Every structure is written in C-alpha cells, then in structure tokens.
Amino acid sequence: MVIYTVTAHTGKTFLAGTTSLIYIQLHGSEAESEEQNLNRLQGFLPGSERTIKINCMASLGELMSVKLYSKPFMGLLYNQWFCDKILVNTPEGDEILFPCYSWLDCDETLVLRPAKASLVFQDTNLIAQKQRMRQLEEQQKLFRWRVYAEGTPQVIDYETSVALPAEVRFSFAKESDFYYSAGKQLAALKLTGLADSRKSWESLSQLEVIICERGKTIEYVQEHWDEDEFFGYQFLNGLNPMMIQRCSKLPENFPVTDDMVKDSLRGSSLEQEMKKGNIFLSDYKMLDELVGNVVGGRQQYLTAPLVLLYCNPHGIMLPIAIQLKQEPGKENPIFLPTDSKADWKLAKIFVRNAEFGVHEVDFHLLRTHLLAEVFTMATLRNLPSPHPLYKLLFPHIRYTLQINIMARNGLISKDGALTLHAGVGGESLVKLLKRATASLTYSALCLPDNISERGLESVPHFYYRDDGMKLWNIINKFVAALLSHYYQSDAHVQKDTELQQWISEIFTNGFLGRDGSGIPSSLQTVTELVKFVTMVIFTVSAQHASVNNGQFEFGGWMPNYPTALRNPPPKVKGQTTEDSILETLPDVGTTVNGMAVLRLLSKDSADHFPLGYFPENLHDEDIPCKLIEEFQKDLRELSDLIEERNKMLELPYIYLNPKNVDNSVAI
Ligand code: FE2
C-alpha cells in the first residue's frame, strides 16, 4: 500500500468556496487511483487548504494528471468552486504542482496537468498525448469562432457573457464592480435630467457642472483644449498617438502653399522645413465619404480632415493648416491659425471629432480589443495547458472575451451607446471597421517598426514612443529568454504542431488570410516567434493602456473629444461664431451620455493586475520563475524612471508607466 497526500487550494476571491461535493482521481502512467471525495460534509471556504490521503495498492507511476469533478451535496445543494491548485506529494517523495485557476461547475470535470511545461513532441507518454488532444477537442467545442461582420476579425460564438464558460468569465468582484459603476452612472444621469435633453449648451462653462470627478489631466484639458500647442501635443501623447507621421511631400489633395503658412514657419518654406524633417501630417482619409449617424433624431456630420503640423525650433508640435474634406476645392477651404479665432477653433473641433472615430473604432476597438480576442481564442483553442506559450499568455487573456461580448452588446449593437450617441456609430462604424481591418499590417502593430515607418524616431517630447519602446524592449527580453528556454532551436518551432495551428488561426480567423497584412501564417524560427509573441503581449497590455486609460481624462471635456457634430463643416471662412460652434457641438444629452461611457471605460477595474504581476502560479520550474522576477524588476525600474521624468512635466505622461498597465484587455 502506498499513500499520496493531496492538498486542494481554494481561491481567495469572494464566493470561491463551495458546498458541492468535489471528487478527485489521480492518473499515473501505470494506474489510476480510486475516485475520492475531497470535502466530505464540509464545504471549502475561500482561501482555504484541505489535505487528504489517497491510498493505492501500488505506485501509479509518473503522475500525468488530476481529474476533478463536482456533484451537488445531498443531490440538491451546489455552487461553483474556484480551485487555485492541487499539490500532490507522492510516495516517491516528489511534490507535484497541478495549477488550476478555474471555476468548476456542478457536474463538470476538470483535468489538470502538472505545472512543468512541455511542447507537444516532448510529451511522449501516450496518456499525456491523449490528454493533450482531448483537452484541445474540448476547448474547441467550447470556444468557437463566428463572423461578426464580413471583412472584420472573427469573434467568439457567444451572444451574451452569461453563456460564457465559467473559466473565462469575470470574477464576482469584477462583475459586481462593473455593474455597480455602470448603474451608478446611469442613475446619476437620470437624476440630472440631462440625459434626454436635445438642447444646445448655452456656454462651455456650463459643462463644468457635469464633470463629477476632476483629476489633474481633465483640468489641464479644460484649460488648454483650445490652444494650438495642446492640440499638437495630443498627436504625440494624447489618447491616440498613432495617426501622425513625418511628411516629406504634400498629398496632392492638400494644396497648402508657402504663402498660407509663412507666418507659422517664420519666413522658412514648406520645402525647406520638409527637408529638415519638421513637417508632419495627420490624414483621416479612412473616414472619407462615411455618412454621419442620426443621433436623437438629428443628422450628424463626419469629415475626413488633413492636418499639417510643424515641429518648431523649440520642439513644439503646432498645427499650421487644416482641410476638413479630402477633395480640395472652393467649398473646402484650408483653415489656418491666422483665420478668425472661431473659424480656426471649429476646424480643430472637426479634427477632434474625426479623432474620436479613428481612435475608438480603429486604434482602440480593432487594434486592441478585437485583436486581443483573436489571440485569446487562438490560445484557448490550440494550446493545451502544459504548453509554455499557454502559460506565458494565460495572464494576458484574462477577461477579454467577456469585456468584448459586453462591448458588442452595450456599445456597438443597435441600441448600444456608440450607435445612439456617436456620429460615427451605426452603419459607418462597421464600414470603418472593415476599412481599418483591410489596411492593418503586422509592422503597424510592432512599435519599433511602427515608429520608423512613420518617421518619428527623433521627434522631441514624444513620451508614448519613449516609454513604449522601453516597455517593448523589456517585454521582448522576457519573452526571448522564456521561449528560448523551451524552443532550443528553430526546428523545435517548426515541429510544434500546436504552435503552428495557433498562428494559422490568428492569420486566418483574425487577419482573414490576408497576405498583405504581413502577419505570418506559420512560424519558422525562434526569432520570428519571439517577435510575434512580444507584439501580442505589448498589444493587449501596453498598447491597450495607452489608448484606453485616458479616455475620460482627455475626452471628458467634451469640446476636446466630441462624439458627434450636428452641423456640416463650414464651406467658407468668416461665418463661424461662438454660437454656431455651440450649435455644432453635441447637444446636452449626447454630451452627458458620451461622458458617462468614457468614464466607465477608463475606470480602474476591480481585480486587475499590473503588467508582470501574475496572481496564478502556473510555473514551478526554476528558470521561468527567475525570469518572471527579472521581468518584474525591469518593470519596476522603468516605473521609477517614468515617475522621475514626469516630475519635470507640466502634464505627466502616465499611461505607459508599467504600474498603470494591465496584463490584459479587461475594460
Ligand atoms: Fe478598452
């Protein structure tokens, strides 16, 4: 007779415990143990440990897996159990960790594999191979792709988050916090009685009344939103640092002349300044010919502006010309800082509204949320739990499926917030999403390539780039060290059939098999693998933080980020007044509803973990554990560096401070 000592660890979160009966069975290479109850007559409390002995006639051989299943107590009482891990002490004197970190529902079974990572061709035991395959078959039944809209990345085949398997759902703490916040916002809106008002604001100072939470940034935005310097600053360090690029030749449809910009360039010419690399462009052609939504029964207007910017000798980025539509012509004037104050202000407001469209639909929704969902789906469907890439990506896919289902239902559905309150909502949103998907490239997603393609290597005061590049390099160093530990040659990459299936689904279901995207359809070398995985982790953590977390701070002051504009762009100069600007900006109801959504979307969520802090103990090997510690140290040092730099800035750039970056797209 031999004895196995088994300790079950229940998660610490609220409601993690259970009164259901939990059964356990050990599977070894030689034999299986009897099924045994883990918690007879006593439920599990959150954070508790329970140890039992399992007697076997002889050694089970190498322990391959642990099976857990749950039955109602007395056939009636049941609730879910969140199991963190199972530790088994074998008669041979080994302690084997079986990570779980999943919910187990009534009449469900979970099969846990040991923490030691292995690639498919290293898992040579027949039982282990079968378990690997069976796990993937099960996962592929649970997580199915579906087409959301032709020409856009595929999504998970669940219409509501309630239907999602427990293992990928929000924790109770996160779910209740999210709904509480949403409910509080709605109740506050109803109380003000402003949510349904179709009136124009009488003055911008009225807006102060509805800003309930005032931080340093929102106050700064309120004070400076109308200044050219802040308008230019936002192209580099605002909500969307992704549009601006160096301009060495004016687009043919943007006929800016030297005469127009002579004051801005202080005697120099466009050609001279382009040669010096001081001229920049932000071109919103992706919005061309999209029709504005109807909001509150009124037609809204979209434009596709071109903005020319000049980085002056002090390193300050300033707008020097704005054309609001793509087709040049008499009724599409080029607005200049020397025009009347109201003309220039309104032109900038139209640009900020175009920013709302491209930022929310392309750079936030598509390039972070939808891609994160693609990476999550491919990981859950193709990488079994012992796979080292599964272990690496596990913290980076947390809550993504649920937040995206909620976004599809609450933001972009027929009665979603963007459909009801945004000029770009409705049919135009899907069109824009398709255009953005069709033009998405691998290099645009890799920060070093992206910065060099846009010619932004030497632009001063570009904190998104400075912090982002450091973060990219830290992630890259960690990923390279960890994956090289498991993939000791390129041949290992090539013969990892699970990995090849993973990248193939990303290419086919996410990037729609578009060779022009540059996304690999297979991986041949360790270097290729490391770069791709760095991009995945950077996208779902840092990139999402940079375009998500400042939504309320930069967008809460409505004129800086109007969700919809009620009048078409001016065809001539000299007719705009402060009153006509108020008549063009969103009405009261649209403003407060938009603000409530932005507040909810950029709120710190409960139960979140900053980049590099992994609550789950998925590894028990020395090298990965050491590499995680080094990764955390590098992140802490970067955090200190950013905080030191920020002390010198009038407006600190905080979005890529690792402390403020979540591991995953979870809000
Ligand atoms: Fe987000």
Image: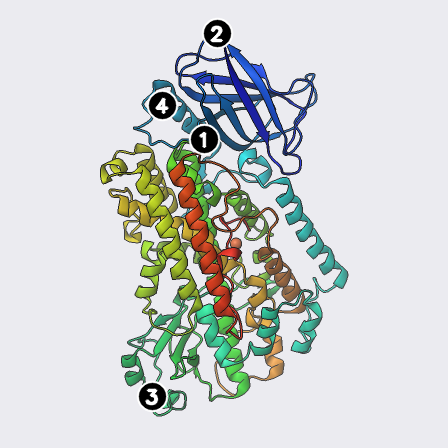
Q: Earlier in the sequence, mark 2 or mark 1?
A: 2
- Residue positioned 60% across, 80% down in the render: 580
Mark 1 is on which residue type? Gln
Closer to the camera: disc 2 or disc 1?
2
Pointers 1 and 4 in contact (CB under 8 A)?
no
Q: Which residue does the numbered mark 3 point to in the structure image? A: 258
The front one of 280 and 193 is: 280
Q: Which of marks 2 and 3 is in front?
A: 2
Residue 582, x across and y down, in percent: 62, 77
User: Looking at the picture, which amino acid does disc 2 mark?
Assistant: Met
Select label 1 or label 3 by which is in front: 1
The local secondary structure at tag 4 comes to: helix
Q: How far apart are marks 2 and 4 (CA)?
A: 26 Å
Which residue corresponds to mark 1?
A: 139
**Residue 374 in the image: above or below residue 236:** above
Residue 479: x percent and y percent? 36, 47
Residue on which the image places disc 4: 129
- Residue occupied by mark 2: 57
Residue 127 is drawn in which quadrant?
top left
